[in-house]
Each structure stands twice: as structure tokens, then as C-alpha cells.
Image (tube, rainbow, N blue to C red):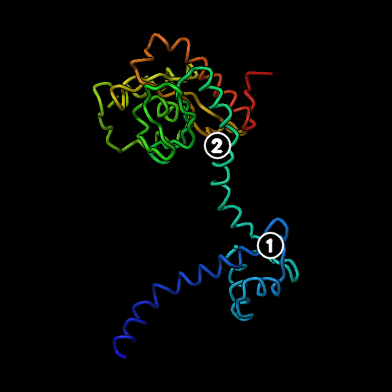
Amino acid sequence: MAGGSAAAKEQGPRSTPILVLRKVSEILNCFSIESPEPTLQQIARTTGLPASTCQRLVQNMVHEGFLDRDGDRYRIGLRLVQWAAPGTLGLDVVRLVRPVLHELRDTTGETACLYMRDGAFRTVVAVAETRHVVMRPFLVGQVMPIHAGAPGKIFLTFDPGAREALLGTDLTRFTPSTPVSWAQLDEQAELARKQGFFAAFGERNSDVGSISAPVFRYDGELAAVLGLGFPIQRISSDDVPRLGPLVAAAGKAASAALGYRDPGQN
């Protein structure tokens, strides 16, 4: 008995939050496009929770902004919607830009990627993979530093938060071509701003190159960075005058898909 009591005490604090979250999840599952504003009685009946438990949880969820109440009906709360918005935006960006990535891949023959920034790093969020046998793999979820490679230069050029995130961090040298000074990064950022794209060769991996351009949101803020990744045995600096404008054009097409209107165009 003593051992069982000790086990119950040990499990209690750990299991209770999980049980509460499960009940909250069951309540949220009661809201759908078909039934966006159920009553308390409908929620209790659907979840199978005791009426008193259901009422207490729903009241707490209203208090925290998870739910809103209108008479005897409830709907998903504004606070929960606000929390979901950043993730929804990211999904919308990927969905809207994916056709542009595939077109860029088909036009150039090289792997096209879409990146988003998280602090001093960039993450691949979408890929249209090359059909060449010789290739460098780019995987969704792959994380890379923003100071090395062409995509990072676009973040540093058009996203003020990228520079702030990188300040105070070590500029790790991955290859002899990796920029490890702010003077060099600023020079690269200026070139990226002037060209509307940036090309880098062997900065993160000695045998990989990249060409990238910005993707802007409807409000003019940087939403993401798209570009090409390729083995430098197939693509060299001699190809940049041909590929750079294609990547820049893809960035503009992706920006237009997000509702951005270039102020320089009528």
C-alpha cells in the first residue's frame, strides 16, 4: 500500500496537466466549419465530460481568450486565432510560392528552395528538387546559418531582424570562402540590394553554390527567400548573368502571389 501511495503521488503532478490538456483539446475539437458556435450542452454531450467539469473548463477557456461567448453559444477566441496566425501565414506562403519554385526548377534545371528565418539561422520550408543525377540534397527542415550562402545574404539585406540576430554571434568559418567579418557581409548585402539577387559559391560547403532573391509580403516586409542550390561542378560564376535574373524574376512572381505590389511599377 505504501508503495502504491508513493507511486500515485509521483504520477499525480505529471499526469494532471496532460489530462487537462486532453480535455481542452476535446473541447476545441467540438468547433468546426459545420458547427462553429456550439452551446455548452452540445460541448458536454460531444466530449462526454461531466457537465460541471465541462462548464468549469469552458469558463476558464473564455477567461484565457481560448473561447469567446455570445449568449449561450461559444466560438474560437480571438487570442487563439492570433496565436495561430504566424503558423498559418507560414503555411500560406509555402502553398502560394510552391508553384513558383517548380517553375524555377523547370526553367533552370536546378533545385529550387524556399527559406524562412529563425534567429541567426535559415530553414528550408519547401523544395522543388532537380532532376539531375548529380545533385546536392536540400531537405525540408534543414537548418543553416544566415551568414554563409546566398539565402542568408538576402535575409541580411532585407530583414533588419536578421542582422540583429547575427550580431554578437560567432561568424563560423566553414570553408575558405565563408565571410567572417561584418565588412564583408555589408559589402555583400549592398551588392544583393543593387542586383535584386545574390550568388555565393562554396561558402557553406566547398562544392555547393546558391543564388537567391527576396520574397515580399503584401505589406512590403520580407516573407521568405527563394533561390537555387546546385553543385559548382555544374554551375559556375559564369552562369550567374543568366541565372541571377531568372531567380530575381521568380522572387517577384512569388511576391506578387503574396499580394505585394512593387512601388516602382504602375
Q: Name the residue located 45 percent from the left edge and 74 percent from the top edge.
A: 16
Residue 29, position in %: x, y? 61, 63
Extreme bottom residue here?
1
Q: CA distance from mark 2 to mark 1?
A: 28 Å
Tell me the number on the disc at residue 121.
Answer: none
Is label 2 or label 1 in front? 2
Q: Name the residue located 52 percent from the left edge and 16 percent from the top edge.
A: 246
Tell me the number on the disc at residue 94.
Answer: 2
Q: Quadrant of the N terminus?
A: bottom left
Label 2 packing within 10 angstroms: few (<14), some (14-19), many (20+):
many
Along the line of sight, which residue is nearer the eye, 22 or 64?
A: 22
Along the line of sight, which residue is nearer the eye, 151 or 110?
A: 110
Q: Amino acid at mark 1?
A: Arg
Residue 30, position in %: x, y? 65, 65
Q: Name the residue located 47 percent from the left edge and 14 percent from the top edge.
A: 243
Q: How many callouts does the rendering have? A: 2
Q: Is residue 140 above or below residue 87?
A: above
Along the line of sight, which residue is nearer the eye, 144 or 228?
A: 228
For mark 1, what is the residue?
Answer: 75
Asked where in the image residue 191 lies, by quadrant, the reply is top left
Q: Name the residue located 43 percent from the left edge and 12 percent from the top edge.
A: 240
Taking the image as shown, residue 226 lies to the left or right of residue 81, namely left
Q: Is residue 136 above or below residue 142?
A: above
Residue 24, position in %: x, y? 56, 68
Q: Amino acid at mark 2?
A: Val
